Amino acid sequence: MLVTIAVLAAAGTLPAAQGRTTLDIYVVDVEGGNATLFVTPAGESVLIDAGNGGPAAARDAGRILDAARDAGLTRIDHHITTHWHGDHFGALEALARQIPIGAYYDHGPTIQPQPASTEFLDTVYPALVARARRVIVKPGDRLPLKGVEWRVVTSGGQVIPSNLPGGGASNPYCAAFTPQAVDTSENAQSVGSHVMFGKFRAVHPGDLTWNKEAELMCPANRLGTADLLIVGHHGQAVSNSEVLVHALQPRVSIINNGTRKGGQPDAMRIILNSPGLEDVWQAHFSLLSGQEYTVPGLFIANPFDEQPDALPIGAWTPPPQGQQPPAPPVHNGKAFWFKVRAQADGTFTVTNARNGFTRTYRAGM
Protein backbone atom coordinates (compact mmCIF):
# COMPACT_ATOMS: atom_id res chain seq x y z
CA MET A 1 0.00 0.00 0.00
CA LEU A 2 1.34 3.39 -0.98
CA VAL A 3 1.51 5.83 1.88
CA THR A 4 2.11 9.55 1.57
CA ILE A 5 3.67 10.83 4.77
CA ALA A 6 1.84 13.97 5.79
CA VAL A 7 3.90 16.33 7.90
CA LEU A 8 2.88 19.92 8.30
CA ALA A 9 5.99 22.06 8.35
CA ALA A 10 6.80 25.40 6.83
CA ALA A 11 9.94 25.41 4.76
CA GLY A 12 12.71 26.90 6.87
CA THR A 13 14.56 29.25 4.57
CA LEU A 14 15.92 32.74 4.87
CA PRO A 15 14.50 35.39 2.52
CA ALA A 16 17.68 35.28 0.42
CA ALA A 17 16.98 31.64 -0.36
CA GLN A 18 13.56 32.34 -1.84
CA GLY A 19 13.06 32.35 -5.58
CA ARG A 20 15.36 29.38 -6.20
CA THR A 21 14.63 27.19 -9.23
CA THR A 22 17.00 24.27 -8.71
CA LEU A 23 17.16 21.19 -6.53
CA ASP A 24 20.39 21.64 -4.59
CA ILE A 25 22.28 18.75 -3.03
CA TYR A 26 25.20 19.11 -0.61
CA VAL A 27 27.37 16.04 -0.08
CA VAL A 28 29.03 16.95 3.22
CA ASP A 29 32.37 15.46 4.24
CA VAL A 30 31.97 13.71 7.59
CA GLU A 31 35.12 11.58 7.39
CA GLY A 32 33.72 8.30 6.12
CA GLY A 33 30.22 8.77 7.51
CA ASN A 34 27.25 10.17 5.66
CA ALA A 35 25.49 13.52 5.56
CA THR A 36 23.65 14.58 2.40
CA LEU A 37 21.48 17.70 2.39
CA PHE A 38 18.76 18.25 -0.25
CA VAL A 39 17.10 21.65 -0.68
CA THR A 40 14.12 21.83 -3.04
CA PRO A 41 13.11 24.76 -5.24
CA ALA A 42 10.34 25.47 -2.70
CA GLY A 43 12.98 25.81 0.02
CA GLU A 44 12.10 22.55 1.77
CA SER A 45 15.01 20.54 3.12
CA VAL A 46 15.83 16.87 3.65
CA LEU A 47 18.99 15.76 5.44
CA ILE A 48 20.01 12.13 5.05
CA ASP A 49 22.11 11.11 8.07
CA ALA A 50 24.20 13.27 10.37
CA GLY A 51 27.74 11.98 10.50
CA ASN A 52 29.81 10.64 13.39
CA GLY A 53 29.35 10.77 17.14
CA GLY A 54 31.64 10.92 20.14
CA PRO A 55 34.51 13.41 19.85
CA ALA A 56 33.64 13.93 16.14
CA ALA A 57 30.04 15.01 16.79
CA ALA A 58 30.76 18.73 17.15
CA ARG A 59 32.95 18.68 14.04
CA ASP A 60 30.39 16.92 11.85
CA ALA A 61 27.41 18.91 13.13
CA GLY A 62 29.35 22.07 12.36
CA ARG A 63 30.06 20.94 8.82
CA ILE A 64 26.38 20.17 8.23
CA LEU A 65 25.41 23.54 9.67
CA ASP A 66 27.81 25.26 7.29
CA ALA A 67 26.02 23.62 4.36
CA ALA A 68 22.62 24.54 5.79
CA ARG A 69 23.70 28.18 6.14
CA ASP A 70 25.04 28.21 2.60
CA ALA A 71 21.60 27.01 1.47
CA GLY A 72 19.89 29.77 3.46
CA LEU A 73 18.17 27.37 5.85
CA THR A 74 16.96 28.24 9.33
CA ARG A 75 15.60 24.73 9.99
CA ILE A 76 15.77 21.24 8.55
CA ASP A 77 12.30 20.06 7.62
CA HIS A 78 12.99 16.33 7.33
CA HIS A 79 15.79 14.13 8.66
CA ILE A 80 16.27 10.54 7.49
CA THR A 81 18.46 8.15 9.46
CA THR A 82 19.30 5.40 6.99
CA HIS A 83 20.31 2.92 9.71
CA TRP A 84 21.59 2.76 13.26
CA HIS A 85 25.35 2.87 12.84
CA GLY A 86 27.23 5.65 14.59
CA ASP A 87 28.74 7.15 11.43
CA HIS A 88 25.19 7.92 10.27
CA PHE A 89 23.37 9.16 13.41
CA GLY A 90 26.28 10.15 15.62
CA ALA A 91 26.11 13.95 15.36
CA LEU A 92 22.30 14.18 15.23
CA GLU A 93 21.89 15.29 18.84
CA ALA A 94 24.59 17.96 18.47
CA LEU A 95 22.99 19.14 15.24
CA ALA A 96 19.46 19.30 16.71
CA ARG A 97 20.72 21.56 19.52
CA GLN A 98 21.72 24.14 16.92
CA ILE A 99 19.01 24.01 14.25
CA PRO A 100 15.36 22.91 14.52
CA ILE A 101 14.40 19.64 12.83
CA GLY A 102 10.77 19.20 11.84
CA ALA A 103 10.40 15.43 11.40
CA TYR A 104 12.51 12.30 11.83
CA TYR A 105 12.35 9.23 9.59
CA ASP A 106 13.94 5.82 10.13
CA HIS A 107 13.39 2.10 9.49
CA GLY A 108 12.38 1.23 13.06
CA PRO A 109 14.30 -0.46 15.90
CA THR A 110 17.86 -1.58 15.40
CA ILE A 111 18.50 -5.25 14.64
CA GLN A 112 22.14 -4.89 15.75
CA PRO A 113 22.22 -3.46 19.27
CA GLN A 114 25.49 -1.78 20.18
CA PRO A 115 26.27 0.43 23.17
CA ALA A 116 26.17 3.69 21.21
CA SER A 117 22.98 2.90 19.30
CA THR A 118 21.25 1.47 22.36
CA GLU A 119 21.98 4.58 24.43
CA PHE A 120 20.92 6.85 21.56
CA LEU A 121 17.66 5.01 20.87
CA ASP A 122 16.77 4.62 24.56
CA THR A 123 17.54 8.15 25.76
CA VAL A 124 18.49 10.67 23.07
CA TYR A 125 16.18 9.90 20.16
CA PRO A 126 12.94 9.89 22.19
CA ALA A 127 13.75 13.39 23.42
CA LEU A 128 14.46 14.61 19.90
CA VAL A 129 11.29 13.22 18.33
CA ALA A 130 9.18 14.45 21.26
CA ARG A 131 9.85 17.97 19.99
CA ALA A 132 8.98 17.04 16.40
CA ARG A 133 7.58 13.89 14.83
CA ARG A 134 8.88 10.39 14.12
CA VAL A 135 7.86 8.35 11.07
CA ILE A 136 8.92 4.73 10.53
CA VAL A 137 9.03 4.48 6.75
CA LYS A 138 8.21 1.57 4.49
CA PRO A 139 9.24 1.00 0.88
CA GLY A 140 6.91 2.95 -1.38
CA ASP A 141 6.36 5.81 1.06
CA ARG A 142 6.63 9.39 -0.18
CA LEU A 143 8.05 12.42 1.57
CA PRO A 144 5.71 15.43 1.38
CA LEU A 145 7.70 17.79 -0.82
CA LYS A 146 6.46 20.38 -3.29
CA GLY A 147 7.68 19.81 -6.82
CA VAL A 148 9.96 16.89 -5.92
CA GLU A 149 8.93 13.22 -5.96
CA TRP A 150 10.76 11.48 -3.12
CA ARG A 151 10.17 7.75 -2.80
CA VAL A 152 11.50 5.37 -0.19
CA VAL A 153 12.70 2.31 -2.11
CA THR A 154 14.22 0.24 0.71
CA SER A 155 13.68 0.19 4.46
CA GLY A 156 13.90 -2.37 7.24
CA GLY A 157 15.25 -5.06 4.93
CA GLN A 158 12.34 -4.72 2.50
CA VAL A 159 12.28 -3.36 -1.05
CA ILE A 160 9.69 -1.41 -3.00
CA PRO A 161 7.31 -3.93 -4.61
CA SER A 162 6.37 -1.88 -7.67
CA ASN A 163 8.25 -0.17 -10.48
CA LEU A 164 8.94 3.55 -10.46
CA PRO A 165 8.37 5.61 -13.63
CA GLY A 166 11.01 4.49 -16.11
CA GLY A 167 11.59 1.22 -14.25
CA GLY A 168 10.41 -2.32 -14.90
CA ALA A 169 12.74 -3.50 -17.65
CA SER A 170 14.60 -6.78 -17.24
CA ASN A 171 17.97 -6.24 -15.57
CA PRO A 172 20.68 -7.95 -17.69
CA TYR A 173 23.19 -7.88 -14.83
CA CYS A 174 21.12 -10.23 -12.70
CA ALA A 175 22.13 -13.32 -14.71
CA ALA A 176 25.74 -13.14 -13.53
CA PHE A 177 25.00 -12.02 -9.97
CA THR A 178 26.79 -13.98 -7.24
CA PRO A 179 25.47 -13.48 -3.69
CA GLN A 180 27.78 -12.59 -0.83
CA ALA A 181 27.35 -13.88 2.73
CA VAL A 182 24.01 -12.92 4.28
CA ASP A 183 24.29 -9.53 5.96
CA THR A 184 22.68 -9.53 9.39
CA SER A 185 23.85 -6.02 10.25
CA GLU A 186 22.06 -2.69 10.23
CA ASN A 187 23.50 -1.93 6.78
CA ALA A 188 20.97 -4.22 5.10
CA GLN A 189 18.16 -2.34 6.83
CA SER A 190 19.10 0.97 5.18
CA VAL A 191 16.48 3.46 4.10
CA GLY A 192 17.16 4.01 0.41
CA SER A 193 15.74 6.98 -1.51
CA HIS A 194 14.89 7.77 -5.12
CA VAL A 195 14.49 11.47 -5.85
CA MET A 196 12.90 12.96 -8.99
CA PHE A 197 12.83 16.63 -9.90
CA GLY A 198 11.37 17.03 -13.37
CA LYS A 199 13.60 14.91 -15.60
CA PHE A 200 16.44 14.74 -13.04
CA ARG A 201 16.81 11.55 -11.02
CA ALA A 202 19.06 10.80 -8.06
CA VAL A 203 19.47 7.64 -5.98
CA HIS A 204 20.80 7.46 -2.41
CA PRO A 205 20.90 3.83 -1.17
CA GLY A 206 22.43 4.47 2.26
CA ASP A 207 24.66 1.55 3.23
CA LEU A 208 22.49 -1.04 1.49
CA THR A 209 24.55 -4.16 0.96
CA TRP A 210 25.16 -6.52 -1.96
CA ASN A 211 22.36 -9.07 -1.59
CA LYS A 212 19.72 -6.45 -0.80
CA GLU A 213 20.77 -4.53 -3.90
CA ALA A 214 19.87 -7.63 -5.89
CA GLU A 215 16.50 -7.94 -4.14
CA LEU A 216 15.76 -4.37 -5.20
CA MET A 217 17.02 -4.64 -8.76
CA CYS A 218 16.33 -8.25 -9.85
CA PRO A 219 14.93 -9.71 -11.95
CA ALA A 220 13.51 -6.35 -13.07
CA ASN A 221 15.18 -2.98 -12.58
CA ARG A 222 12.48 -1.26 -10.52
CA LEU A 223 14.21 2.13 -10.55
CA GLY A 224 15.27 2.69 -14.15
CA THR A 225 18.29 4.89 -14.75
CA ALA A 226 19.68 7.77 -12.69
CA ASP A 227 21.55 10.96 -13.43
CA LEU A 228 23.25 10.99 -10.03
CA LEU A 229 24.22 8.16 -7.70
CA ILE A 230 25.31 8.97 -4.18
CA VAL A 231 27.43 5.85 -3.97
CA GLY A 232 26.35 3.37 -1.34
CA HIS A 233 28.32 2.47 1.77
CA HIS A 234 31.16 4.95 1.14
CA GLY A 235 32.32 2.93 -1.86
CA GLN A 236 32.89 -0.35 -0.02
CA ALA A 237 32.95 -3.71 -1.77
CA VAL A 238 30.21 -5.30 0.35
CA SER A 239 27.92 -2.96 -1.58
CA ASN A 240 27.98 -1.49 -5.11
CA SER A 241 27.18 -4.55 -7.19
CA GLU A 242 26.76 -4.39 -10.95
CA VAL A 243 23.06 -5.17 -10.57
CA LEU A 244 22.63 -1.78 -8.90
CA VAL A 245 25.41 0.48 -10.17
CA HIS A 246 25.54 -0.69 -13.78
CA ALA A 247 21.78 -1.00 -14.12
CA LEU A 248 21.26 2.57 -12.88
CA GLN A 249 23.80 3.84 -15.44
CA PRO A 250 24.49 7.05 -13.49
CA ARG A 251 26.07 9.89 -15.41
CA VAL A 252 27.78 10.99 -12.19
CA SER A 253 28.66 9.13 -9.01
CA ILE A 254 29.71 10.88 -5.79
CA ILE A 255 31.50 8.90 -3.09
CA ASN A 256 31.43 10.14 0.50
CA ASN A 257 34.48 8.20 1.64
CA GLY A 258 37.12 8.74 4.30
CA THR A 259 40.89 8.81 4.06
CA ARG A 260 41.05 5.06 4.67
CA LYS A 261 37.40 4.08 4.57
CA GLY A 262 35.60 3.27 1.35
CA GLY A 263 36.83 3.72 -2.18
CA GLN A 264 37.96 0.08 -2.15
CA PRO A 265 39.48 -1.25 -5.39
CA ASP A 266 36.80 -3.90 -6.04
CA ALA A 267 34.04 -1.32 -5.63
CA MET A 268 35.90 1.32 -7.63
CA ARG A 269 36.30 -1.05 -10.57
CA ILE A 270 32.53 -1.52 -10.70
CA ILE A 271 31.78 2.19 -10.21
CA LEU A 272 34.32 3.36 -12.82
CA ASN A 273 33.15 0.79 -15.39
CA SER A 274 29.48 1.73 -15.13
CA PRO A 275 27.85 2.19 -18.57
CA GLY A 276 27.26 5.84 -19.44
CA LEU A 277 29.41 7.14 -16.59
CA GLU A 278 30.90 10.57 -17.19
CA ASP A 279 32.56 11.41 -13.86
CA VAL A 280 33.23 10.18 -10.32
CA TRP A 281 33.75 12.69 -7.50
CA GLN A 282 35.28 11.66 -4.15
CA ALA A 283 35.23 13.32 -0.75
CA HIS A 284 38.80 12.15 -0.13
CA PHE A 285 41.74 10.50 -1.79
CA SER A 286 41.35 6.91 -0.60
CA LEU A 287 44.46 5.19 0.68
CA LEU A 288 42.63 1.90 0.19
CA SER A 289 42.66 2.34 -3.58
CA GLY A 290 45.74 4.49 -4.08
CA GLN A 291 46.22 6.38 -7.32
CA GLU A 292 45.31 3.29 -9.30
CA TYR A 293 41.59 3.65 -8.55
CA THR A 294 41.33 7.27 -7.40
CA VAL A 295 40.01 10.11 -9.55
CA PRO A 296 42.09 13.17 -10.52
CA GLY A 297 42.57 15.82 -7.85
CA LEU A 298 40.10 18.24 -9.42
CA PHE A 299 37.36 15.79 -8.46
CA ILE A 300 38.51 15.31 -4.83
CA ALA A 301 37.05 17.67 -2.24
CA ASN A 302 39.22 17.28 0.84
CA PRO A 303 42.89 16.95 1.80
CA PHE A 304 44.50 15.48 4.89
CA ASP A 305 45.42 17.81 7.74
CA GLU A 306 49.07 16.98 7.07
CA GLN A 307 49.08 16.60 3.30
CA PRO A 308 52.07 14.61 1.99
CA ASP A 309 53.95 15.73 -1.11
CA ALA A 310 53.04 12.50 -2.88
CA LEU A 311 50.31 9.92 -2.47
CA PRO A 312 50.76 6.17 -2.98
CA ILE A 313 50.21 4.73 -6.43
CA GLY A 314 49.19 1.24 -5.34
CA ALA A 315 46.30 0.18 -3.13
CA TRP A 316 46.89 0.00 0.62
CA THR A 317 48.19 -3.32 1.92
CA PRO A 318 46.83 -4.18 5.37
CA PRO A 319 49.28 -5.48 7.99
CA PRO A 320 49.56 -9.21 8.72
CA GLN A 321 46.74 -10.76 10.71
CA GLY A 322 46.98 -9.91 14.39
CA GLN A 323 48.81 -6.63 13.83
CA GLN A 324 47.06 -3.30 14.18
CA PRO A 325 47.41 -0.86 11.28
CA PRO A 326 48.58 2.67 11.99
CA ALA A 327 45.87 5.28 12.40
CA PRO A 328 44.60 6.70 9.11
CA PRO A 329 45.48 10.28 8.17
CA VAL A 330 43.42 12.82 10.08
CA HIS A 331 41.19 15.49 8.59
CA ASN A 332 39.68 17.63 11.31
CA GLY A 333 40.40 20.96 9.68
CA LYS A 334 38.31 22.91 7.19
CA ALA A 335 36.09 20.61 5.15
CA PHE A 336 34.61 21.07 1.69
CA TRP A 337 31.40 19.73 0.21
CA PHE A 338 30.23 18.88 -3.26
CA LYS A 339 27.25 20.95 -4.35
CA VAL A 340 24.91 19.64 -7.02
CA ARG A 341 22.43 22.00 -8.67
CA ALA A 342 19.80 20.22 -10.76
CA GLN A 343 17.36 21.82 -13.15
CA ALA A 344 13.95 20.42 -14.02
CA ASP A 345 15.02 19.70 -17.61
CA GLY A 346 17.63 17.22 -16.30
CA THR A 347 20.69 19.45 -16.65
CA PHE A 348 22.82 19.59 -13.50
CA THR A 349 26.15 20.88 -12.28
CA VAL A 350 28.58 19.57 -9.66
CA THR A 351 30.92 21.99 -7.88
CA ASN A 352 33.91 21.11 -5.72
CA ALA A 353 33.88 23.71 -2.94
CA ARG A 354 37.60 23.26 -2.29
CA ASN A 355 38.78 24.50 -5.67
CA GLY A 356 35.67 25.89 -7.33
CA PHE A 357 35.90 23.35 -10.16
CA THR A 358 32.46 22.94 -11.74
CA ARG A 359 31.25 20.60 -14.42
CA THR A 360 27.89 20.82 -16.18
CA TYR A 361 26.01 17.76 -17.40
CA ARG A 362 23.55 18.80 -20.08
CA ALA A 363 20.15 17.18 -20.38
CA GLY A 364 19.89 14.68 -23.22
CA MET A 365 23.64 14.31 -23.69
Image (cartoon, rainbow, N blue to C red):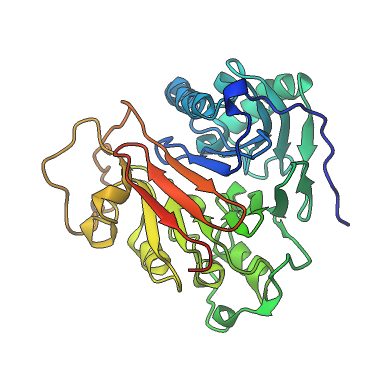
- Relative image position of residue 41 (x, y in whole percent): 64, 40
Q: Nearer the viewer, residue 100 or 149?
A: 149
**Quarter of the rendering containing residue 132:** top right
**Residue found 68% across the figure and 34% down from its top:** 44
Q: Nearer the viewer, residue 65 or 365?
A: 365
Residue 14 visible? The answer is: no
In this rendering, the answer to whether 90 lies above or below 170 is above
**Residue found 56% across the figure and 22% down from its top:** 95
- Relative image position of residue 206 (x, y in whole percent): 57, 49
Residue extending farthest to the right is 1
**Residue found 61% across the figure and 19% down from its top:** 99
Quadrant in which the N terminus appears: bottom right
**Quarter of the rendering containing residue 5:** top right
In this rendering, would 279 be left or right of 218? left
Residue 205 visible? The answer is: yes
In this rendering, would 294 be left or right of 340? left
In this rendering, the answer to whether 319 lies above or below 58 is below
- Relative image position of residue 332 (x, y in whole percent): 33, 27
Residue extending farthest to the top is 97
**Residue found 54% across the figure and 37% down from its top:** 88
Q: Which of 298 and 57 is in front in this view?
A: 298
In this rendering, the answer to whether 63 lies above or below 247 is above
Q: How many labels does the image show?
A: 0
In this rendering, would 209 be left or right of 282? right
- Relative image position of residue 314 (x, y in whole percent): 19, 59
